[in-house]
Image (cartoon, rainbow, N blue to C red):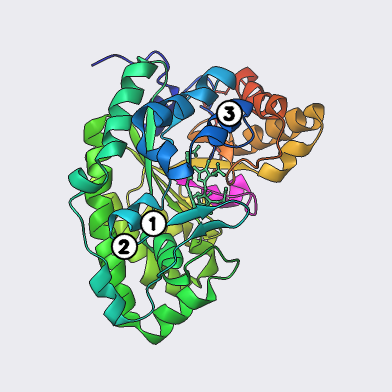
Amino acid sequence: MTTLKNDLLLRTLKGESVERPPVWMMRQAGRYLPQYMVLREKFGFFERCQTPELACEITIQPIDIIGVDAAILFSDILVVPQAMGLEVQLIESKGPVLPDPIKTINDLSRVRVPDVDDTLNYVFDAIKLIKQELNGRVPLIGFAGAPWTLLCYMVQGKGSKTFDEAKGFCYTQPETAHKLLQMITDTTIAYLKKQVMAGADVVQVFDSWGGLLSPADFEEFSLRYIRQIISALKEMAPTILFAKGAWHSLEPMAATGATALGIDWCITPQVARQLAGPGVVLQGNFDPAKLVSPIPVIKKEVKQMLAAFGGQRHIANLGHGILPNIPVDHARAFVDTVKEFQSSRTTIAV
Ligand code: CP3
């Protein structure tokens, strides 16, 4: 095994005192990079995900171009519903579309808990190739969608601001919803374990739509299943749990045993620390839309964010994915400002 040259992320996740926070950006491999757009012209989205050489090249682009401290596998959370038997398309200017969504218990016969070695084997091949190509430069983050967020797409059949049909399904057919959530959970556990076995150093669970649920419904339809995933993975690799908008549940999320919790920009680092407790690492939380600001403003605001987190037990990141309209030098300014920061070795924001 190659030893890591940049292990700042892993040391932070171990709770060690570090010289500065590690930095990466959610969706760092994506449309704001001209080099990504070149490959996007030539290949379809799932072709890019399913071809290990392409996934590898796209994963490494932000390491070379922006200089982040971690790579995140280029793939998508929707490869899991695909592996479970549903058709998923990605339509330009429309986003993901699932033409035959789950609406009733009868539709469950069309989904299965697949053997991930047969259906998602291209992901594990990509991870092995990426690890080889990275050659220890930075660690690799694997990921999956949280069961609730995947249910949202599997039931609604497309993106939505409210996912009202997915919620309606849970509230009117709770038994069917729980069956589906358990199937997604079982698939995800096997999938993430295999990602770690293939070489992922850390895994992140994305619950992008967790914030649409009330605290009680978040517990019932989301956290219950996330807890199973974190428990199954935590002996194998550090885990990062990002449930966007679900700040009200930071305390129970910390109790899952996740190594780190992602937060968005709608909560201050100080309040997040109070809710999550002193032990867990926090990740976030720069507003991605603010990266359109002039570079001096970005630098000033990033420094304020870093100071508010206190320099330790913090992974600098955006509060959600980087947007396609962000100039590359603005993304670089975000990353460089974190790299210039010097953490005090004693302060942990409480
Ligand atoms: O972070 C990374 O760079 C790794 C790659 C990654 C992608 N999707 C690539 C992608 C990751 C971690 C994801 C996760 C993902 N996918 C989430 C959770 C994170 C989040 O942003 O909330 C969700 C909800 C999805 C589902 C999805 N995939 C949507 C809604 C879309 C369309 C909207 C959009 O941002 O384009 C996608 C497509 C997608 N996934 C793209 C990329 C780079 C854009 C594809 C393209 O047009 O080239």
Residue matched to label 2: 225
Q: Which residues are magenta?
A: 261-273
Closer to the N terminus: mark 3 or mark 2? Answer: 3
Residue matched to label 3: 38
Kindly identify the residue that appears in the image at 36 percent across and 33 percent down: 51
Q: Picture coordinates of residue 101 (x, y %)?
A: 40, 70
Q: Quadrant of residue 177?
A: bottom left
Total numbered labels? 3
Q: Picture coordinates of residue 342 (x, y %)?
A: 60, 20
Task: State the quadrant of the N terminus.
Answer: top left
SS at badge 3: helix
Of marks 3 and 2, the one in the foreground: 3
The answer as to whether callout 3 falls within 8 Å of ligand 1 is no
Q: Is residue 335 magenta?
A: no
Closer to the N terminus: mark 1 or mark 3? Answer: 3
Say what amino acid the circle numbered 2 marks. Tyr
Q: Picture coordinates of residue 279 (x, y %)?
A: 41, 42
Is the residue under label 1 in contact with that under label 2 (CB below 8 Å)?
yes
Of marks 2 and 1, the one in the foreground: 1
SS at badge 1: loop
Mark 2 and mark 1: span between their CA atoms?
A: 8 Å
Say what amino acid the circle numbered 1 marks. Ala
Q: Is residue 19 above or below residue 260?
A: above
Task: State the quadrant of the C terminus.
Answer: top right
Q: Nearer the viewer, residue 29 or 40?
A: 40
Viewed as shown, does residue 230 lie left or right of 273? left
Say what amino acid the circle numbered 3 marks. Val
Viewed as shown, does residue 142 lie left or right of 310? left
Closer to the N terminus: mark 2 or mark 1? Answer: 1
Residue matched to label 1: 146
Q: Is residue 91 above or below residue 153?
A: above
